[in-house]
Structure formats: structure tokens, C-alpha cells
Image (cartoon, grey):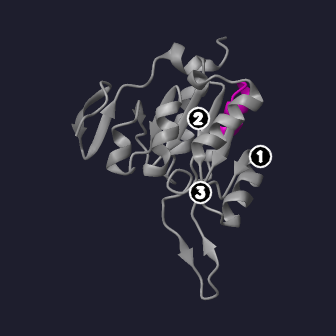
Amino acid sequence: MALSPRFLGIRENFFLMRKPGRERLRRIRLVAFDFDGVFTDNRVYVDQDGREMVCCWRSDGIGLQRLTEVGVRAVVISREPNPVVVRRCEKLGIECLAGVKDKLSALKHILKREGIEPEQVCFVGNDTPDIECMRFAGLAVAVRDCHPDVLKEADYVTRNPGGRGAVREICDIIYGAKKPTS
């Protein structure tokens, strides 16, 4: 498996990677996330009536608020048309594009609309449909429990798995680089 030059090795069953440099993080103006497997633990609960439910990490909302404080927008781009994706994003106060067949085209549309360059984008994904966006973005982040093919594309792999603090982790890293020093 060809790995990123930022790959440091394996310890305790997870990949060790250097955090992206402060200047690279300071350029970020938009963080685009996949939903399932990033905001969730990639499991889906289905009740007897066929309604789906997922489990999300509460403190992700605080991380997303911190991004707003430093002028970074957040958006979810999901292939999943499930209303739970839209409802969670509404609660978090972030833009959501659900049921998207071509994630890269959707991401490019957002950048054009907002006047943002690809190197100013961080994309956070977990599975093979995210790879094109990860290759396009200036900073590609994979969650700890991502598909192995996604690892090859990652500039950074979170220490926390999807649905268990990965979103908060990347928000905190970007916030820490961009927050005003006192």
C-alpha cells in the first residue's frame, strides 16, 4: 500500500501522522464533510417500520461553532438521501447537500459560489466515494476507521473514529491554528 509521505507508522492499531502545518491550516476557509461514517459511527439502526436512526457525537457541535468563530464555513456533502442527515445539519446550523450523486461537482459549485480556492478547503471523508473530493481539496482528512483505500489519500488521519469525536478533533485543530493569539 502506497502511503502519504506524512505517514509515520503504526502503533496500537492506528496510523500516526503529523498534523498539517499551522500555515496550511490557517488558509482553510471551508471544511466539507461526508456524513455517514464521519459524523456517525457508520452504523444505522432500523426500527420495525423501516425508519432509520444514527448515532452522532454531541461535542461535534461545539467544534463546528468554534470554526464559525474563526471564519471557517462548514458543509456536509452526502450521497445519503435520508432525512436524518438534513435534520442533524439543521440542528448544527450548517449547510447540507444530501442525496448528492457527484460529490466533487457539488464541492466545486460551493467553491465557485463562495469564491474559495481548492487549497482553502479541507475535506473529511471515510469511504471510497470521498476520494475524488479528498484529492481535489487542499487538505484531505480521513477518520481513523476509514476504508483502507481512503488512507492513501489522507494528509491527516484523525485519532478518533467517525461518530466518536473525529469531527470535533479536526475542528479543534483548525480552530487552534486560526484563533487570534492573546
Residue at the bottom extreme?
Answer: 48
Identify which residue is drawn at 63% across, 48% down.
77
Q: Quadrant of the C terminus?
A: top right
The residue sitting at 61% across, 47% down in the picture is 59
Q: Which residue is mark 2?
A: 171
At label 1, the amino acid type is: Gly
Q: Which residue is rendered at x = 60% and y = 23% of the image?
A: 120
Residue 66 within the magenta-colored segment of the rendering: yes
| Magenta region, main secondary structure | helix
From the top left corner, tell me how far across and down residue 92 is, in percent.
73, 49
In the rendered structure, which disc, 2 or 3, sits on the residue that comes first in sequence?
A: 3
How far is the residue under mark 2 from the one under mark 3?
22 Å
Give the mark nearer the N terminus: 3 vs 1.
Answer: 3
**Element type at marker 3?**
loop
Instruction: Estimate how packed mark 3 is, as few (under 14), some (14 to 19) or many (20 or more) residues with alpha carbons within 10 Å.
Output: some
**Magenta stretch: includes residue 104:** no
Number of residues whose C-alpha sits closer than 10 Å to that of mark 1, classed few (under 14), some (14–19) or many (20 or more)? some
Counting from the top left corner in percent of width and height, residue 74 is at 68, 38
In the image, residue 121 sits, relative to residue 34, either above or below, namely above
Q: Secondary structure at mark 2?
A: helix
| Residue assigned mark 1 | 93
The three-letter amino acid code for the residue at tag 2 is Cys
The magenta stretch spans which residues?
A: 63-73
151 up-or-down from 182: above or below: below
Q: In which quadrant of the rendered view does residue 47 lie?
A: bottom right
When the figure is inspected, residue 181 is found, relative to residue 35, above or below; the finding is above
Residue that label 3 marks: 79
Marks 3 and 1: which is nearer the front? 3
Between the C-alphas of marks 1 and 2, the distance is 15 Å
Tell me the residue at 24%/35% (across/down).
Answer: 2
